Image (spheres, rainbow, N blue to C red):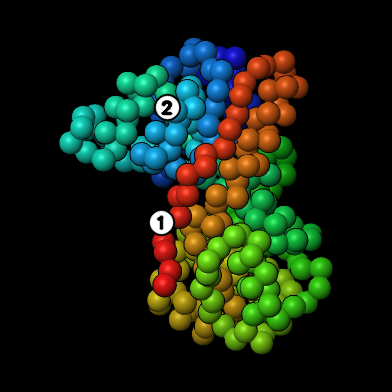
Amino acid sequence: MKLIDLIGILEKRAPLYLSESWDNPGLLVGRRDKEVKKAIVALDVTEDVISEAIIEKADVIVTHHPLIFGAVKTVNDSTYTGRKILRLIENGICHYAMHTNLDTAFGGTNDTLAKIIGLEDIEPLAVSCEQDGMPNGLGRLGTLKEKVHFGAFAADLKDKLSLECITLVGNKSSIVSKVGLCTGAGFEFIDEAYAKGCDLYITSDVKFHEAQKALDMGICLIDATHYGTENIIVPVLKEYIDSEAKKNGYEIDVVTSKCNGQVFGYV
């Protein structure tokens, strides 16, 4: 299949109009008419992922996070981003990113986390747009099948996300039933979660004073790490591409990255 055909499949799931104005999703490196026989799906375009793609002889790396965000004034080996772009081009590997459009999209990162948690009656948290005639936006909220102690819920979530540790704010004995969440760095939506009656909010990259705010508000808070809340979309994307390619008669080998992109360690 051509890369443009793969892009059509990806943008069917997460249209670019769903992305935030500051974002930079889409085809960032490569030619749309390139023949694509193999794709590798990852969270980020790291040096390890590029090396993996070279070994796998992949034609394109599909990621959640874009390699290129701000203005790129030079592409050479003197910058971190430049070196990676050069490696991609030199090895004939394209790069396509699905970022905040995938966060917002139905079946994207937030819906995936909500499904893992087991939420019911799921709806968008911060409505800002429409998709397929339905209100949509960043984050999700829903209810648990049964009320549970905050500490027990957190321990279960840590296991479900295969994390060494997660950070909690609030009394572990508190009872939680209505949950708001935003994958990645989404503390900014805690006010919406609180206003809509959530007694627990899940996100990542929480700062000290933000944690204080949650404590003062009386809402339990979990920081499940940026990687932990978003890498869950990688196998989902692989399955989606496989299914859509087969449905449309395209032949493509899709693999998920085996690189561990979690940058934080614990002692």
Q: How far apart are marks 2 and 1 (CA)?
A: 22 Å
Toward the viewer: 251 or 8? 251
Q: In this view, does 199 lie to the left or right of 44?
A: right
Q: Alpha-carbon neighbours of circle 2 within 10 Å: few (<14), some, or many (≥20)?
A: some
Q: Number of numbered discs present?
A: 2
Identify residue for label 2. 54
Identify residue for label 1. 263
Residue type at mark 2: give it. Ile
Pinpoint residue 204: horizontal percent, then vertical percent.
Answer: 49, 63
Q: Which residue is drawn at 61% across and 59% down?
A: 161
Pinpoint residue 212: horizontal percent, then vertical percent.
Answer: 45, 81
Check the image and report above or below for 95 versus 227: above
Residue type at mark 1: give it. Val
Classify residue 202 by image quadrant.
Answer: bottom right
Pinpoint residue 48: horizontal percent, then vertical percent.
Answer: 39, 40
Classify residue 29 by image quadrant.
Answer: top left
For the question of whether residue 130 can be seen, the reply is no
Q: Alpha-carbon neighbours of circle 1 within 10 Å: few (<14), some, or many (≥20)?
A: few
For the question of whether residue 234 can be seen, the reply is yes
- Which quadrant would the C terminus be assigned to in this image? bottom left
Check the image and report above or below for 133 versus 53: below
Q: Residue at x 48, y 14 (%)?
A: 34
